[in-house]
Amino acid sequence: MKLRSATQSDANQIYMIAKTAFQRNLLPMELLEQHLAADRVHYLINEEQTAFLSYTKFFDEAELDLIAVQPGLQGQGLGQAVLEEWLKNLGSCRVLLEVAENNIRARNLYLKFGFSAYHERKNYYPDGQTAILMEKKQ
């Protein structure tokens, strides 16, 4: 799996992947364009432009913001490959993320990569779901 830093020219593709993968507008185009221009939130996209990952990094901590795969390609290991490549190149730090309680596929993926739950935020999401906060030290 080869990932590259996303650029402004990737904005439309990232937006469409996010919109269809999450079935709600988690990533408005205006915000995505601001992120790409400011370079505070980092976006990595695969060469085929079918999956992306976004994260922030401050000193010795990184936070996984989003990971998304085009719906027709989900369940084929692409998300796993993106996550694995990112972690491999991230270096030594504490990695944080949040995941919806009912997102069992994502939670199992994170557990497989050594993440562990450390806190819950009840009624965190608009639909009332709990957010599971996870971390990994690498």
Image (tube, rainbow, N blue to C red):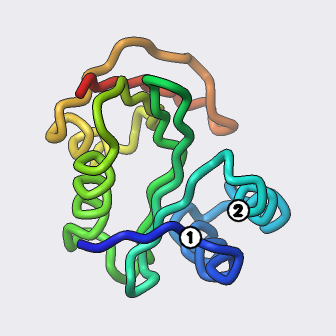
Identified at 45% across, 25% down, the residue is 61
- Residue 39 in percent (x, y) is at 68, 53
Q: Mark 2: which secondary structure?
A: helix
Identified at 33% across, 79% down, the residue is 73
Give the amino acid type for the residue marked by disc 2 in the picture.
Answer: Leu
The residue identified by callout 2 is 36
Indicate the quadrant containing the C terminus: top left, top right, bottom left or bottom right. top left
The residue identified by callout 1 is 6
Give the amino acid type for the residue marked by disc 1 in the picture.
Answer: Ala
- Residue 26 in percent (x, y) is at 68, 55
Give the camera-side residue of 12 and 138. 138
Q: Residue placed farthest to the top in the image? A: 119
Q: Mark 1: which secondary structure?
A: loop
Horizontally, is 120 left or right of 78 in the view?
right
- Residue 31 in percent (x, y) is at 80, 57
Indicate the quadrant containing the N terminus: top left, top right, bottom left or bottom right. bottom left
Horizontally, is 104 left or right of 121 in the view?
left
Identified at 50% across, 67% down, the residue is 5
Q: How far apart are marks 1 and 2 (CA)?
A: 7 Å
**Relative to 29, does residue 125 appear above or below in the rendering?**
above
Q: Which mark is residue 24?
A: none
**Relative to 137, does residue 46 appear above or below in the rendering?**
below
Q: Residue placed farthest to the right in the image? A: 30
**Relative to 3, does residue 138 appear above or below in the rendering?**
above
Identified at 39% across, 75% down, the residue is 46
Residues at marks 1 and 2 touching, judged by CB atoms closer than 8 Å: yes
Tag 2 or tag 1, which sits nearer the N-term? 1
